[in-house]
Amino acid sequence: MTDRSTPPLPAAVLWDMDGTLVDTEPYWIAAEYAIVAEYGGQWSDELAHQIVGNPLLVSAEFILANSPVSMSPDELVEALLERVVARVTECVPWRPGARELLDDLRAHGVPCALVTMSWASLARAVTDSLPEGSFAVVVTGDRVTHGKPHPEPYLAATAALDVPPERCVAIEDSATGVRSAVAAGVPTIAVPNVVKVPNIPGAVRLPSLAGLGARDLTPLFP
């Protein structure tokens, strides 16, 4: 007999990557500073924070519009990725509680998807450092037509997992990502990191994932 006092498990958990699963935002910002400086320009945290969570080509176009960098958007994305992948390959900077929650979800048989606006090369650098099968599905920014805050990335993940969005839980760190997940109908946990996340209907804010287990997720939502 099932214990009715035991909270149900989510059908799946959909993870953002940069700033949520891994603390790579400082790597991205450092790469932006370096590339802009190489072209004789100046970058700032204020500018960098405006593009957190965006699709990479959108971020690249913003950098080009606010600096003397003369690459094409695709070239700039590749240049940024090369630097960030190199640093992640040296050391994966896990966010507090993220690795432990991911392990607990796997132990409970809850499938996970990685839903990131980073491209496949960086996603591989992260997933290759995890046990095989940690992510049943990986959706990357170079494989979708519309990036966050459009719901397509999260709808693609739930379709690939063959689970209803409303029975999943998404974990995000930016307003852009939260809006994407909520628009897809996924109950969402916002864990702000580099940028603040406002109150968004359909999402709950937590200061950290530390101490959370698989059965702690669904009770967060009414």
Image (tube, rainbow, N blue to C red):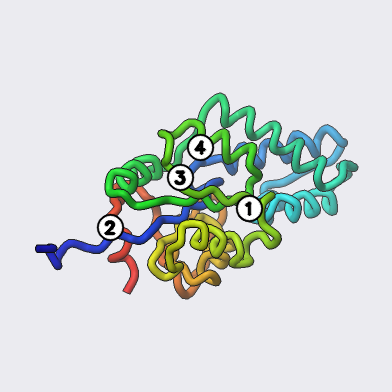
Q: Is residue 202 visible?
A: yes
Q: Residue at x 57, y 27 (%)?
A: 89
Pointer 2 or 3: first along the chain: 3
**Disc 1 crowd, CA 10 A, few/some/many (<14, 14-19, 20+):** many
Q: Residue at x 30, y 45 (%)?
A: 104
Pointer 1 or 2: first along the chain: 1
CA–CA distance in space, label 3 to label 1: 23 Å
Label drawn at residue 52? 1
Residue 216: % across, % down: 28, 57
Placement of the N terminus among the 4 image quadrants: bottom left
Q: Amino acid at mark 3?
A: Phe
Q: Secondary structure at mark 2?
A: helix
- From the viewer's perspective, is the residue at label 4 or at label 1 nearer? 4
Mark 1 touching mark 2, by CB under 8 A? Answer: no
- From the viewer's perspective, is the residue at label 2 or at label 3 nearer? 3
Mark 3 touching mark 1, by CB under 8 A? Answer: no
- From the viewer's perspective, is the residue at label 3 or at label 1 nearer? 3
CA–CA distance in space, label 2 to label 4: 24 Å
Q: Amino acid at mark 2?
A: Asp
Q: Secondary structure at mark 1?
A: loop
CA–CA distance in space, label 1 to label 2: 27 Å
Label drawn at residue 135? 3
Label drawn at residue 216? 2
CA–CA distance in space, label 4 to label 1: 21 Å
- The front one of 182 and 48 is 182
Q: Is residue 131 left or right of residue 196?
A: left
Pointer 4 or 3: first along the chain: 4
Mark 4 touching mark 3, by CB under 8 A? Answer: yes
